Image: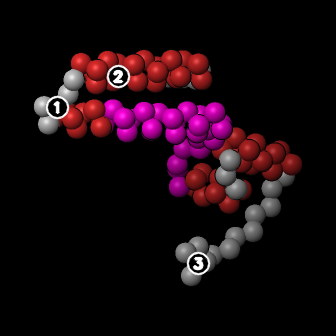
Amino acid sequence: MRTRNRAVQVYLNEKEYEKLEQLSRFSGNTHSAVIRKLITGKEIRQRPDLNFRALAMEISAIGNNLNQIARRANQMQVTTADLKEAKLLMREINDRMKAAGGDWA
């Protein structure tokens, strides 16, 4: 069942429509989603590019490795090799984020 059951038709001039198009392209949202965000006061954020998504997936995988090392450390089974691996993983995250550029670099 549809949660939004009230249809609204809005007429825009060329300048207003171009602004709506621009916001839609910028955010990767539909016109309807952009309008809903605007009327509810939510921020319209730029859609992350594909490189960012790939980087996020890689960092997630590295995070899983770090969690495994932390689990062993909590069980007092951590070795020097584990700590070296953790350090290398953290350096890899840092290097990949710098290479990707963006606000976090």
Element type at mark 1: loop
Which is nearer the N-term, disc 2 or disc 1?
Answer: 1
Question: Is residue 5 placed above or below 69 in the rendered structure?
Answer: below
Disc 2 to disc 1, how far (Cα)? Answer: 14 Å
Q: Nearer the viewer, residue 61 or 31?
A: 61
In the rendered image, which residue does mark 2 sit on?
Answer: 85
Image location (x, y in percent) of residue 63: 38, 35
For the residues labelled 2 and 3, the Cα–Cα distance comes to: 50 Å
List x then y, in percent, for residue 84.
32, 18
**Residue neighbourhood size for the residue with mark 2, other residues' Cα within 10 Å, grouped as few (<14), some (14–19), many (≥20):** some
Answer whether labels 2 and 3 touch (C-beta < 8 Å): no
Q: Which residues are magenta?
A: 40-67
Residue 4, percent from left and from top: 58, 73
Q: Residues within 10 Å of mark 1 (few under 14, many from 20)?
A: few
Q: Which mark is residue 77?
A: 1
First in residue order: circle 2 vs circle 3 = 3
Magenta span contains residue 96: no
Q: Which residue is mark 3?
A: 2
Q: Quick one: SS at disc 2?
A: helix
Question: In the image as oriented, which residue stretches furthest toward the left?
Answer: 76
- Residue 20 location in percent, x, y? 74, 48
Residue at x 80% of width, y 50% of height: 17
The residues bearing labels 3 and 1 have C-alpha atoms spaced at a distance of 53 Å
Quadrant of residue 91 in the image? top left
**Are the residues tagged 2 and 1 within 8 Å (C-beta)?**
no
Magenta-colored stretch includes residue 65: yes
Residue shown at 67%/52% (left/top)? 29
Label 2 amino acid? Glu
Query: From the viewer's perspective, is the residue at label 3 or at label 1 nearer?
Result: 1
